[in-house]
Amino acid sequence: MSDLINSSLRELSAALATRQVSAVELATLFLDRIEKLNPSLNAFVTTDRAKTLAQARTADEKIVGAGGSAISPLCGIPVAHKDIFCTQGWRTSCGSKMLTNFVSPYDAHVVEKLAAAGMVTLGKLNMDEFAMGSSNETSYFGPVKNPWNVSCVPGGSSGGSAAAIAARLTPAATGTDTGGSIRQPAALCGLSGLKPTYGVVSRYGMIAFASSLDQAGPMAKSASDCALLLNAMAGFDTRDSTSLQRPVEDYGRDLEKPLAGLRIGLPQEFFGAGMDADVRAAVDAALAEYRRLGATTLEVRLTNSGLSVPAYYVIAPAEASSNLSRFDGVRYGYRAPEYADLAEMYSRSRAQGFGAEVKRRILIGTYVLSHGYYDAYYLQAQKIRRLIAADFQAAFQQCDVIMGPTSPSVAFAFGAKSADPVQMYLSDIYTISTNLAGLPGMSLPCGFGANNMPVGLQIIGNWFDEARMLNVAHKYQQVTDWHTRMPETLK
Ligand code: GLN
């Protein structure tokens, strides 16, 4: 029973179908681990055993009712959701005091789709407040600890998702990635995580941070697990005007394709100063492995990628300042207990309900959109965004996928960057440009660096190339075992 915590989703599916384990037993196994380990990790912010077990019983009925005939391969498998996804009947806090008592009247599209596939919700996962951060230190509910070393950050903003999988508190989780928030925590916690092409997964019911960048995606132990999850998450949704109407895909269709002839582009800009030596060593070793698998590597240029962090920190705050104006103490969320008039009710509710990083972003965003500065900042950033996207298109003329590090360093200690926002923002230097270009990106574990902390390899594909990226990741995972490792102390 206990080895089920390390099983792949396919193995869990088989164990459920052959009734070696029931969905209720599986959910109980993980709920018990959460009860035991979460107090020291703080990955989950909400659990509800009765609700989870009720969903598990329904899944068991479906599996028994199907009598061995095909049902969704995810039926009966537990999942946990980043607390940015609205979940009917469960609190949805987005890591903020603003929403500590908010219970959504509906499910996000992603939540709905995974539930329709029969997945069983274990609970809601901690995150940086409104997904703003790279270390999970901005959460109103306190920081999440990295299961590999509890004095280090798990990355962010989907740090709760990453820590929960790394500690085997759940076999799978949802995350969102606006500038790196799926890939960077996946890297820092030794997991596989994929940010799809913008528009592939509906943003309906996902609390908006920067709408033109936000994208939901799967986080799990392996690429093949991510493929199964993405199959269930993706799809057209009329409730999100940026959702793309495309034929339904099996993202796992190419998993086993040999890599002979694959052209891997290595951007000079991703391999310069700024990347720690231990990260570089692990990434270089992974590239050597890819060459052994038959791939070739070549140098490509992403000339404008150095401008991605500054452009992002204009565009994302601009969109956030608009999106977060809905939290005004009137419609939902926190309202200040005392105020003299309406204006003071707004300002006090927002002053008390938002944390420092969220306020910083609202101020920056309002500033760059204001008269006189709009042209100088916002419009310039949009132009740079276009140049960054064009660089990628030129690179993809020469190569099939791009590779590099996910994060410039392994997980850092709490407090190491929280006093200096710019240092923190640089954590996403290798991930942000894909969001600006709307491209899919993925991180997979490729070794260990300083203090035995995990290192992530990033794969970037062209638009809609998720199946190929998953293939590229899966073939590597067949010849390496980094993705199977878990922290010794939590076994
Ligand atoms: N770390 C980046 C930020 O703070 C990205 C966050 C994200 O992807 N949600 O904005």
Image: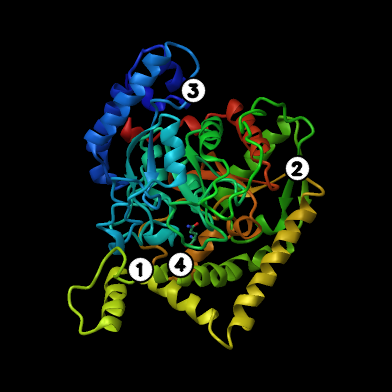
Earlier sequence position, callout 2 versus callout 4: 4
Residue count near mark 1 (Cα–Cα under 10 Å), binned few <14, some 14–19, many ≥20: some
C-alpha gap between disc 2 and disc 3 = 28 Å
Dot placed on the residue nearer the N-terminal end, 4 or 3:
3
Q: Residue drawn at (51%, 39%), measured in percent from left and top?
A: 233
User: Which is closer to the viewer, label 1 or label 2?
Assistant: 1
SS state under label 4 = helix
- How far apart are the alpha carbons under marks 4 and 1? 9 Å
Residue 400, numbered label:
2
Of the numbered discs 1 and 2, the one sitting upstream in the chain is: 1
Residue type at numbered disc 3: Arg
Crowd rating for badge 4 (residues with CA inside 10 Å; few <14, some 14–19, many 20+): some
Q: Position of residue 345 (x, y in %)?
A: 26, 78
Give percent across and percent down for residue 107. Answer: 39, 46
How far, Cα to Cα, is label 2 from label 4?
Answer: 36 Å
Residue labelled with disc 3: 10
Q: Residue under label 1, please give it.
A: 327
